[in-house]
Image (cartoon, helix red, strand yellow):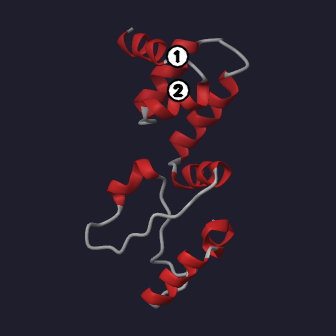
Amino acid sequence: LIGELECLETPAVRAWFTAQGVSPASPAVRVVPPEQTGLIPEEAERLPVPLSEEELERVRRATATDRVAGIEEELLAFRDSEDNRDGLLRRALAAGVPAHRIVELSGVDPTTLSSASRD
């Protein structure tokens, strides 16, 4: 995934890798979505990179667990159907999908998500 991101071609990012003496292909390099920066060790070097919406979506999918990725696929499909809406929303919350992500993928109103989590 990392080699496929356009942000790696920007002069600023390339200069940062050169200054760090590391290749973007290094196994030590990680790209995480903004909501997962807490997973990066405190002592690690960090560089915020400009990701397009499509790249951000790919990074999110690549870093998601199989369980979360499966639920996210269902949430995307949910936009076209409301079958078992509350059950799907509860499963997504139980799987650890952040509420903002559920709203983004499913298109539900945040208050709908709140009521589904209480049922």
- The residue at which mark 2 appears reads as 103
Q: Nearer the viewer, residue 76 or 87?
A: 76
Instruction: Please say if 109 is above or below 94.
Output: above
Mark yes or no: residue 98 visible: yes
Q: Secondary structure at mark 1?
A: loop
Q: Residues within 10 Å of mark 2 (few under 14, many from 20)?
A: some
Identify which residue, 53 or 58, lies in the foreground: 53
Of helix, strand and loop, which one carries label 2? Answer: helix
Total number of numbered discs in the rendering = 2
| Image coordinates for residue 23, horizontal then vertical, percent | 54, 85
Q: Amino acid at mark 1?
A: Asp
Q: Nearer the viewer, residue 53 or 75?
A: 53
Which residue is at 52% across, 64% downward?
49
Apparent side of residue 106 relative to residue 117 in the rendered image (left or right): right
* Mark drawn on residue 75: none
Mark nearer the N terminus (2 vs 1): 2
Give the residue drawn at x 26%, y 67%.
42
Crowd around label 1: few <14 · some 14–19 · many ≥20 (10 Å): few
User: Residue at the spot x=43%, y=86% of the render?
Assistant: 20
Q: Is residue 76 above or below residue 79?
A: below
Residue at 46% in and 19% down? 110
- Return the residue at label 1: 109
* Mark 2 touches mark 1? (CB < 8 Å): yes
Q: Could you say which quadrant of the image residue 93 lies in?
A: top left
| View extreme (left): residue | 42
Percent from the top left, x then y, of residue 30?
48, 68
Q: Is residue 5 visible?
A: no
